[in-house]
Amino acid sequence: MTDDVIAMRPRMMSVAYRMLGSVADAEDAVQDAFVRYQTAGGVSSPEGFLIRTTTRLCIDRLRARRRREYIGPWVPEPVATGEADEASALSESLTQAFLLLLERLSPQERAAFLLRTVFDYEYAQISEVLGKPEATARQIVSRARRRLGLDSTRRFPASPVRAEGLAERFLQACRAGDVRAVEGMLAEDAEVHSDGGGRVSAARVVILGRERAARFLSGVFGKKRLNCEMLPTTVNGQPGVVFVFDGAVVQVASLRIEGGVRAVYMTSNPDKLARWSSAQVD
């Protein structure tokens, strides 16, 4: 393959990760797309072929995944990133909150919405990817926007306003087991999504409400992870923390801040931590 073709990999990964919420699955889809490109022959537009093939492979993977049961709450695989640029569509669409929101959509709706709204593809290009008439592609994007609660002018849900220092204070209070302090920084309708994938101990349902969330987080940070090193980091463009025990990453958590802490996304499924810090997703 030529250098120009290989240079398409970051764009392909960007599409595949947002489609699948899994680095491992995204890497597999991208590799499969490259294999198909090598065997296709006579491709006039490598970019068009690779993005179209990657997206279609992701649609197939999503359809297969929805037939399988997942144990407990599902959280998108976390990736280590720099601090998000809130003006960037790529950054806004990388957060775990946004990727979870996309779970409301069918595989085709997800593909059409991402290609149009995040990657600025024309409807004619989207129709080619989906194998649908252009008018149908427009309808699919419109339906996806309605399901996500977006009007005709907003591209994404409103970006959270970060309170300076709130993330650091919140994590310190959780670590100290100070339930009252944690509760004071949580939004009233706070949520905690804890993903163990049935591999390790984790809450089997989403923890809802300020009081329950405060008790749960204080228990996990202040007791269960007491012997772990706690390292502040940026997860999918959002403030977060990595728990390390005996040199191995055992949990990654990120915060969604909207005035107070609106949601906490905790990943301890070992399958989703294997690529932590090494995965490259824009």
Image (cartoon, rainbow, N blue to C red):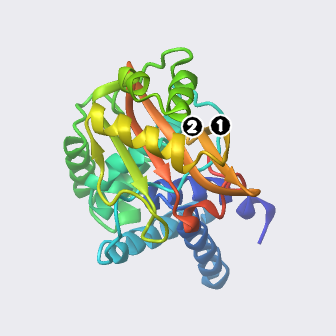
Residue 48 seen in render? yes
Along the line of sight, the residue nearer the viewer: 138 or 168: 168
- Image coordinates of residue 59 in percent, x first then y, are 39, 69
- Image coordinates of residue 208 in percent, x first then y, are 26, 41
Q: Find numbered disc 1 in the image and state the secondary structure of the residue it sits on.
A: strand
> Label 1 is placed on what type of residue?
Thr
Q: Residue at x 33, y 32 (%)?
A: 157
- 155 displayed left or right of 235: left
Report if the CB atoms under discs 2 and 1 are less than 8 Å apart.
yes
Numbered circles on residues, count: 2
Crowding at mark 2 (Cα within 10 Å: few <14, some 14-19, many 20+): many
Q: Residue at x 63, y 45 (%)?
A: 242
Q: Which residue is mark 1?
A: 233
- 169 displayed left or right of 7: left
- Image coordinates of residue 38 in percent, x first then y, are 67, 80
Q: Find numbered disc 2 in the image and state the secondary structure of the residue it sits on.
A: strand
Q: Which residue is mark 2?
A: 240
- 49 displayed left or right of 102: right
- 158 displayed left or right of 165: left
Quadrant of the rendered image containing residue 131: bottom left
